[in-house]
Image (cartoon, grey):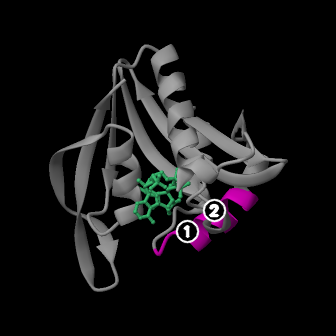
Amino acid sequence: MSAVLKIAPCFAPMQPEDIDAVLAIEQDAYPFPWTRNNFADSLAAGYSAWCCRVNGVLAGYAVMMLVVDEAHLLNVTVAPDWQRRGYGMLIVHHLFGTARSHGAGRMFLEVRPSNAPGQGLYTRLGFAAIGRRRGYYPTGDGREDAVVMAADL
Ligand SMILES: CC(C)(COP(=O)(O)OP(=O)(O)OC[C@H]1O[C@@H](n2cnc3c(N)ncnc32)[C@H](O)[C@@H]1OP(=O)(O)O)[C@@H](O)C(=O)NCCC(=O)NCCS
C-alpha cells in the first residue's frame, strides 16, 4: 500500500552518465527491456527524462515526450526493491507537473493488458483506456496488444 512511503524522493533530469544504472533496473524490471540506445536516443532527442533518487539511491526513472499540447509517457519504472511504496505514483505526479508546465493538457501512454501493476497504477492516477494497438508488443511466443490510455492534466 502506497501509504507506507516514508522518504521523499529527489527528481533530477536523466544524464548520459545515469544510463548504466538505469539499464540495470530496466533489465530487472521488464522481460523486454529498453536498450542503451533507446535511452541515449531519448536524451539526444531532448525528451523529458527523469531520475528519482531516495537518499541518493536510484529508485526509479521515467521518460516522456512532450509534443505541443500533448505528453506521451514512454517509460516509467520503479526498481523491483522499491516497488509498492508509492514511488510510481510520485514519479507520474512529477511528470504531470512537468507536462502541465510545458502547456500539455493531456497525457497518453501504452501498457500491456498483462501488466496488472502498470494498469493499476495508471487507473489509480486517473487514466482511462481509449483504445488498443494490435500486436504492439513482443511476447515470448508472438505479439501482444497495447491498451492506449489517456488522462486530462
Ligand atoms: C508499474 C510500476 C511503475 C508501479 O510502481 P510502484 O512504485 O510499485 O507503484 P505504487 O507503489 O506507487 O502503487 C500505486 C498504485 O498502483 C497500483 N499497483 C502498483 N503495483 C501493483 C501491483 N503489483 N498489482 C496491482 N496494482 C498495483 C495500486 O493501485 C497502487 O496503489 P496501492 O499500493 O495503494 O494499492 C512498477 O510496478 C514497475 O516499475 N513495474 C515494472 C515496469 C512497468 O511495468 N512499468 C509500466 C510500464 S507501462
The answer to whether 60 appears left or right of 126 in the picture is right
Tell which residue pokes out farthest to the bottom in this image. Answer: 141
Question: Is 27 contained in the magenta span?
Answer: yes
At 58% from the left and 48% from the top, the residue drawn is: 3
Over which residues does the magenta segment extend?
A: 20-31
The amino acid on which the numbered mark 1 sits, given as a three-letter code, is Ala
Instruction: Give coordinates of residue 99: x percent, y percent.
Output: 47, 24
Q: Quadrant of residue 22?
A: bottom right
Say whether mark 1 is within 8 Å of ligand 1.
yes
The amino acid on which the numbered mark 2 sits, given as a three-letter code, is Ala
Say whether mark 2 is within 8 Å of ligand 1.
yes
Question: Is 47 contained in the magenta span?
Answer: no
The answer to whether 137 appears left or right of 62 in the picture is left
Number of other residues with Cα within 10 Å of mark 1, as a class: few under 14, some 14 to 19, many 20 or more: some
Mark 1 secondary-structure assignment: helix
Mark 2 secondary-structure assignment: loop
Q: Quadrant of residue 117?
A: bottom left
Instruction: Name the one closer to the observer, 11 or 37.
Output: 11
- Quadrant location, the C terminus: top left
Instruction: Give coordinates of residue 20: x percent, y percent.
Output: 74, 60
Decide: is 35 above or below 104.
below
Tell which residue pokes out farthest to the right in this image. Answer: 56
Main SS category, magenta section: helix
Disc 2 marks which residue?
79
Decide: is 13 above or below 99.
below
Q: Earlier in the sequence, mark 2 or mark 1?
A: 1
The answer to whether 120 appears left or right of 7 in the picture is left
Tell me if residue 114 can be seen.
yes
Number of other residues with Cα within 10 Å of mark 2, as a class: few under 14, some 14 to 19, many 20 or more: some
Disc 1 marks which residue?
29
